[in-house]
Image: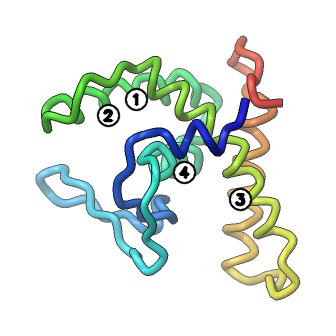
Amino acid sequence: MDTGRVLREEQSSWLQVDAHLDNTLFRPDGAVVLLDWCNAAIGPPVLDLARFLIEGVVEPTRRYRVTALLSLYRDELRRLGVGHVSVGELESGFELVLLPLLQGAIGWAGRDDLELGTRASTVCESFLRSMCGWVLGDDPGSKRESKVL
């Protein structure tokens, strides 16, 4: 499957590109605000969604929790009038972006200018470790094998 082609055919929107908890504020009313839009791009929204979930949901039951969170995301899309998206479609999109995100994490970790012992190297290592866990399916509670590798 040509993952890049499939993702290019998805609906596009503005992407924050670096969606993780450090770039997130939660308002008292529960609304979420993403910060740090300096690298914004246009592409399939599942990229931001996957990046946020991969780094934000790290406990052993994360695959179960992600399915529940994707259901909430689908419900919010429907509330906002954004088409009929199923949880299955969201899960498929999530699976599609795992490999490109892993490639990006490996590229980031391999940079010559990434100084060890800095916050950037710690964040990079954490992201790479989390990505490997998702792609390789190292969840002890998961009975599902990775479809990516």
Label 4, secondary structure: give it.
Answer: helix
- Inter-mark Cα distance, 3 to 2: 25 Å
Return the disc, 4 or 3, that comes first in the chain's sequence: 4
- Inter-mark Cα distance, 2 to 4: 14 Å
Return the disc, 3 or 2, that comes first in the chain's sequence: 2
Q: Mark 3 and mark 4 in contact (Cβ < 8 Å)?
A: no
Left or right: residue 148 versus residue 56 is right
Name the residue: 49% across, 30% down.
66
- Inter-mark Cα distance, 4 to 3: 13 Å
The residue singled out by tag 3 in the image is 126
The residue singled out by tag 1 in the image is 70
Name the residue: 77% across, 54% down.
103
Q: Mark 2 and mark 1 in contact (Cβ < 8 Å)?
A: yes
Label 1, secondary structure: give it.
Answer: helix
Task: Report the amino acid beneath label 3.
Answer: Ser
The residue singled out by tag 4 in the image is 51
Q: Which mark is residue 109?
A: none
Return the disc, 2 or 4, that comes first in the chain's sequence: 4
Q: Which mark is residue 73?
A: 2
Q: Mark 3 and mark 1 in contact (Cβ < 8 Å)?
A: no
- Inter-mark Cα distance, 1 to 3: 23 Å
